[in-house]
Amino acid sequence: MHIDPSPSSSPDAGLDDKRPWYQLLSRYHWFVLVVAALGWLFDCLDQQLFILARPAAMKELVHAEDYEDAKSLDLARRRGGDIATSIFIAGWAVGGLFFGMLGDRIGRAKTMIITILLYSLFTGLSSFSHNVWDFSLYRFLTGLGVGGEFAVGVSLVAEVMPTRARPYTLGLLQALSAIGNMSAALINLGLGIVEEQGMEYSPWRIMFLVGAVPALMALVIRRHLKEPENWEKVAHSEKTSKKLGSYRDLFRDPTLRKHALLGLVLGCSGVVGLWSVGFFAPDLIRYVQRRAMALEVYNEQLVIAEGQGDSARVERIKLLLTTVEDPDLMRDFDQEVKDEYELLDGAVNGRLSRWASYTSIATNIGAFLGMFGFGALSQKIGRRPTFAISLVAAFLSTVAVFWFLKDFWQIWVMVPVMGFCQLSLFAGYAIYFPELFPTRLRSTGTSFCYNVGRFVAAFGPLVKSQLEAAFVETSEPLRYAGVTMSLVFLMGLFVLPFLPETMNKPLPE
């Protein structure tokens, strides 16, 4: 099969055509959208696998014998997760800057292939980690590919699509990323159920092996995807070919410099908020429900042991029940009780994985609607007003979740609203950032706005970790830290008045 760009693939084709946006798209338009969407979908699958596997990975990679009490161990494991997250985000930022520039220099399609292969390979290698530091190294290298894929993907779609269809297709591209996130949640859910029944291998390691599969998609991209016509013209022009992907050129022009710096602040608001607060919602539900799940599992097993007349096991489980309120008591028990704990802890973790998976699914149900909704609303009232609404809504909904989330029914009521509000911002970035820069610098500028903020975001989990330590004397420090960090969503409001409105305008050339 060979798919060629149709003559109507020019971005300005159909500018005055009043048909619904989807009728403006040719067969090749749909092919480009599907390829870019799958690249970003698998990218987000990798991110979500990491988020959901992080607590279980830290439980195995941070060893209990190295810490004096349960509270220190728990804090060390959460800090290990924060370190790995920060290093992953830093890799994302570095990869975004490098591959964003490369996307302007060698082409969108070629760069997309490289980034997909990179994040697939090192996601798979993450499953072979032995400690926090080699795990973090693999996550950094994975982040290089993850960071580069977004800018080249949205630049490709923005340059190929008709102008009037552009916000809808970019909103749909971003919305489909929620499918990747939900797929990761379903993988985690299935492995959690298997873990609950008893499993020889660590489920989190299997999850990362699954994340290596997207590398196969690179074969399809290499055969059928062509570079956008606009990029080809610029790349072969004597005037502009030497200025492709030049950060120096980006910052030498006063208007482009302004767009890059203000866009960076706008990007920071959502990126820091999501990675420092929003993506810790599954951790929150695991944290607040661990005691209840342990009691449930222990009491179930106690009834089974009593029914079997196994008095020795009954006594062991009764001792374990005392540790639910005071985990430090475990150190005073003999090895048989500790072995019983290890046996039952798999069932506890399996049930907590279910809760974390439900939280992720609920987040992404809302996210899908929010991201596509941003595209539709921004085409009616403008990009800037839609951003303002989304930023305020993200702040309020995140505070509500971190302050009140506790029970199962709340996952399906509060969390989708938070996902709708938080993730709608990312559709805005996909739509808006490519509209701020000319073809020769589009991938570079988009990547700068979207990814440099990740250097700031990389410190977010560490700040959250410090806030947790500051609130450690409270009953649930993660709640207080999350509410405090939610203020970052409001930062974007301060730069919106100084950025241009781009609704219904062609891409700058």
Image (cartoon, rainbow, N blue to C red):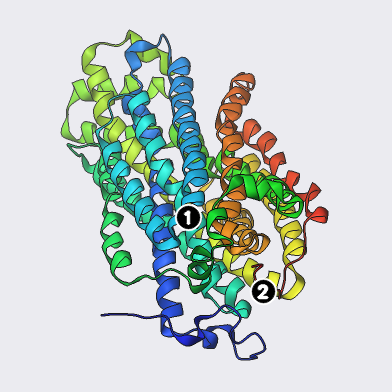
Figure check: 456 above or below 424: above
Identity, as a three-letter code, of the amino acid under mark 2:
Pro
- Image location of residue 164, percent across then percent down: 63, 79
Q: Secondary structure at mark 1?
A: helix
Which residue does the image show at 62% across and 36% down from the upper left? 482
Residue nearest the viewer, comparing 335 with 164: 164
The residue type indicated by label 1 comes to Arg
Where is mark 2, residue-wise?
506
* Residue farthest to the right, as pictured: 497
- Residue 491 position by quadrant: top right
In percent of the image, x 60 and y 46: which residue is there? 247
The residue that mark 1 highlights is: 105
Q: Quadrant of the N terminus?
A: bottom left
Q: Residue at x 45, y 61 (%)?
A: 108
Within 10 Å of the Cα at label 1, are there few (<14), some (14-19), or many (20+) other Cα atoms? many
| Residue 401 visible in the current orientation | no
Q: Is residue 294 left or right of residue 340?
A: right
User: From where the camera sits, is residue 495 visible?
Assistant: yes
Q: What label does residue 68 carry, if any?
A: none
Image coords of residue 190 (percent x, y): 29, 52
**x and y percent of residue 207 in the render?**
29, 45
**Looking at the image, is mark 1 or mark 2 earlier in the sequence?**
1
Front in this rendered view, residue 157 or 7: 7
Label 2: which secondary element: loop
Front residue of 27 and 235: 235
**Residue in the image at 76% along x and 61% along y:** 384
Q: Above or below — where is 403 with respect to 341?
A: below
